[in-house]
Amino acid sequence: MRDVYVTVNHQSSEPPGNDGWRTLLAHTAANALHDSRARYDPPKCDEDTRVEVIRELTNWIEDRESPQRLLCMTGAAGSGKSALQQTMAEICSKSNILGSAYFFAAADSTRNTTSSLVATIAYQLGRGNPGLKEYIGSAIEEDELIISRSLLSQLTALICDPVRLLHGAGKLDLGSFRYAILIDGLDECQGEDNQAEILLAVKECLLNTDLPFRIFIASRPEWAIRHALRSGGELNELAYHIQLSDQYDATADIRRYLWRRLHDLGLRSSDPRAQSPGWFTQEHIEQFVVAASGQFIYAATVIRYLSERRSSPMDKLKIVLTWTPVNSQSARPFEQLDLL
């Protein structure tokens, strides 16, 4: 009897791009996501606060016909930029238009450089679109070093080209595509040159007219973004610029925030004195408003300090009031934060 040999070809049952997608995952920054565990209970705008600026941001991001597809919001430390970004990320997520959100943080080594930025944006875009996920993974399989290349090369290969290919193949419904890209804390990315590279890559790639993206970037007014937005700068005519500290007075919002939080804190307290409606007064609130000088971070830090469970908020309120200036001339909110 003759021996019979059968050759069996083992073919991978994995969809195209899966190996590349796994490589992408290894380079993402989970902590940078708007709903990451590392950012649990992130700052966001209280109900009935920052109403005007949220309305302006929402109108801009939902107006897909507007020619200015980049919005840059600048503001001083503590002016509420991250809270606004978080609020907008949640609004966009509920509206099914959030493509990605990336929150830089200077103290977190996984999200204080550019190394994970594009991979994390691409991950979020691909996770919500299986066709795009395949194209992104395949792009990495074709060039395994793409994630180590320049930001412009990464954006082109992992985001812009896959979107174009998917659209060209008739597999991309622009009407349902999640087009909003949010980047918070540009100034917390290490190195001014790196910050400038991000802005240039966004301009050269994501703002191309054949792509559907609308990008919202928030930053302190540091050199890179000031240079780009100045008269004659590369983003001057392309970006819609909101100067948070100059255009929006947060005083009324801070007042509402303090009243609501102090009221809730008293209701939750085990100290009978704090449960009384008069445990804080309007005069106390006005003193805090003056001390805050328009900086939400001051008000939020006061509430966080008063909320510590080890002692009564009534006793802590007395302590904070002894440190708090009573007129705007002596208000130095960041010195007061150091005391807290």
Image (spheres, rainbow, N blue to C red):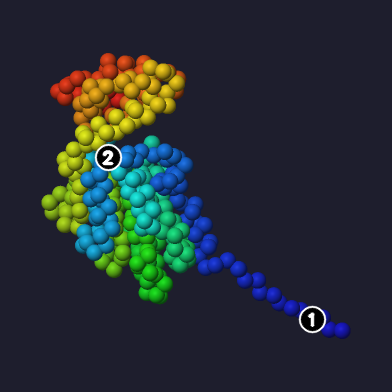
Residue mark closest to the camera, 1 vs 2: 2
Q: Earlier in the sequence, mark 1 or mark 2?
A: 1
Q: Residue 302 at x, y = what percent?
A: 32, 26
- Which residue bears the numbered disc 2? 49
Q: Amino acid at mark 2?
A: Thr
* x and y, in percent, of residue 135 in the image: 44, 66
Q: Amino acid at mark 1?
A: Val
Query: Which image quadrant for residue 283?
Result: top left
Residue at image position (45%, 21%) is 270
Tell me the SS state at disc 1.
loop
Q: Residue furthest left?
A: 231
| Percent of width and height locating residue 168 | 37, 74
Asked if residue 92 can be seen in this view, the reply is yes
Q: Quadrant of the N terminus?
A: bottom right
- Verify CB contact (< 8 Å) between mark 1 and mark 2: no
The mark found on residue 4 in the picture is: 1
Q: Residue furthest front?
A: 277
